[in-house]
Amino acid sequence: MQVAVSGGKGGTGKSTVAVNLAVALRKLGANLTMADLDVEAPNDHLLLGVELTNEEPVNQFMPRFDYSKCTKCRKCAEVCEEHAIITMRDGTPFLMPTLCSGCRACEIVCPVPGAILEGWRTIGHTYVTETSYGFTLVTGKLREGEERSMPLVVAAKRRAAEIHENSGGIFLVDTAAGTGNTVSKAIEFSDLLIAVTEPTPLGIHDTELILELGKLMEIPTWVVINRVDLGEKEKVYGLAEKYSAEVVAEIPYSENIVKSYVGGKPVVLTDYPEAEIFEELAKRVLRFLGGGE
């Protein structure tokens, strides 16, 4: 069973909810694999206090030209939707690597066998880390300066899914902020979407975007309101009702959560009163996945 934790606006506490939910689920005896698919800014390992291990590169196709065979027909440049291939006045092709999406269209249309050769570049890495909390964390991390995160999200989710298939239990996915294609890919095939928001104007605006995405993808959606005492939570409840979602938890603005964050210890493992919020959320998730809710 796959559970995705997401949220339209960045900085709402999405990762805090995901990490504490994971630890709470494990405390309740659930088998769990967690994937941090916020590949541009992965921080679940920081919240869990673990070092990333078992690094594997994620490579993307990048064409190389054999100019001794190239006929300078310009077809590779004409077919490149990303405009990553430009040609000189005489038709000689030249590649701008950062624009290349690795689609291989140039290779397909090239009329001369061997004129375009396979090249590769590393766009990021995936990691598999055994946490001290009894579950595996899979992390995707994009290289600095890279603009295309989708291949890395796919690779990290695939690596996590393989581990999950062998171990079973719950597949918990922590996505990037926003509602772009990488978020859609991350929550794809989820049995439950947990949208984390805050009752501020920007938070409320982006809540509607993630609820709309959940509706389009036909995923049952819950809402967790973080820093609930900082804004107009009634508007969040109104949006949830509009999209047939349910508000399942309210988290107050809390110095205790900040202290646990700084200390590298999930708040659900402390004796702070906020721990009960995540414990109850975990119990609710288990009831839902078990068909009891």
Image: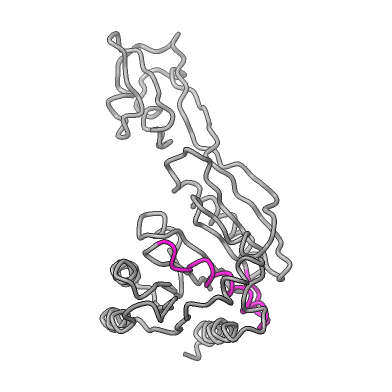
Left-right relation of 150 to 58? left
Q: Quadrant of residue 246?
A: bottom left
Report x, y in % for residue 250.
45, 83
136 up-or-down from 115: above or below: below
Report x, y in % for residue 268.
62, 79
**Most distant residue in the bottom direction:** 292
Report x, y in % for residue 68.
45, 8
- Is 19 part of what is drawn in magenta? yes
Q: Please tell me how many numbered marks the rendered image carries.
A: 0
Q: Residue at x 41, y 61 (%)?
A: 10
Q: Quadrant of residue 166?
A: bottom right
Left-right relation of 21 to 129? left
Q: Residue at x 40, y 67 (%)?
A: 7
269 up-or-down from 203: above or below: below
Q: Nearer the viewer, residue 277 or 112?
A: 277
Q: Nearer the viewer, residue 42 or 172?
A: 42
Magenta residue span? 10-32
263 up-or-down from 246: above or below: above
Report x, y in % for residue 25.
62, 78
Q: Main secondary structure of the magenta part?
A: helix
Q: Residue at x 61, y 71 (%)?
A: 259
Left-right relation of 66 to 21? left
Q: Residue at x 42, y 32 (%)?
A: 98
Left-right relation of 249 to 213? right
Q: Please name the colour scheme applied to the rendered image.
A: one colour
- Is 25 part of what is drawn in magenta? yes
**Most distant residue in the front direction:** 255
Q: Quadrant of residue 21?
A: bottom right
85 up-or-down from 259: above or below: above
Q: Nearer the viewer, residue 114 or 30?
A: 30
